Image (cartoon, helix red, strand yellow):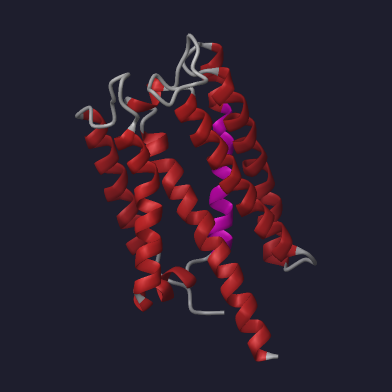
Amino acid sequence: MPNKSSLLPAVTILIIWGALSIYLASQGNFQNSPDAPPYTLMAAVAGPPTLFGILYGLSNRVKCYVLGLDLVLLTAAQGWRVIGAMFLVLMTYRLVPGIFAWPAGVGDMIVGLYAPFVVMVLVRRSPGWRSHLRWLNILGLLDFVGAIGFGVLSGNNPLGVLRGDVTTDAFQLLPLSIIPTFAVPAWIIIHVISLLQLNHYAVSEIGEI
């Protein structure tokens, strides 16, 4: 296993990124008119993971840093996904639609509750820890695919074929805008890093046999 990378660069990037997301939302940059798809919001979700993939593929320095991040800490961070239960609360106040809240909220809670167990088996290197780690991250990514998809399809835009009386337009404004413009892409990157580490060191261990 490699030496652990310092968390300072990653934390600095997260702070700047979060502050930028809040500023852009305060200026109305993530709001879209009903006759246009939510391009800026979708770009905020997909852009950072795409940029991360490009940097990882092109820079050995970035790759070494990413592969040196603490896998236990990355896995533990998924425990915060239990806050997705708030979608169900927001649904009861008619702030978000049920077609989005149920899959997104329940999916987040499953991942968040599964994460501490995976941390435990990872630390102990219990039998099957790799499978549990892989499934945690796959489930987490699938949850985001569903949440993003239902979020767009139930929004007040030309793609909103599933929209009803309540839409997901609240995510275009603060404070909820911080979820799609920061929290979701950040967690996607964490999932991807965890899978990259799992694959890289599995290959390395095979090579050492």
Quick check: can you spot residue 58?
A: yes
Q: Position of residue 28 (x, y in %)?
A: 23, 27
Given residues 7 and 54, the one toward you in this image is 54
Quarter of the rendering occupied by the C terminus:
bottom right
Q: Mostly what secondary structure, the magenta segment?
A: helix
Please provide the residue range marked out in magenta: 71-85
Image mark count: 0
Decide whether residue 171 is among the magenta residues.
Answer: no
- Quarter location, residue 35: top left
Q: Position of residue 116 (x, y in %)?
A: 66, 50
The outermost residue toward the right is: 127
Decide whether residue 74 is among the magenta residues.
Answer: yes
The vertical placement of 176 against 164, above or below, is below
Position of residue 34 in the picture relative to residue 153 (left or right): left
Residue drawn where x is 65% and y is 90% of the image:
208
Q: Position of residue 17 (x, y in %)?
A: 30, 48
Residue drawn where x is 34% and y is 31% of the image:
38
The outermost residue toward the bottom is: 209
Quick check: can you spot residue 175?
A: no
The outermost residue toward the left is: 27
Quarter of the rendering occupied by the N terminus:
bottom right
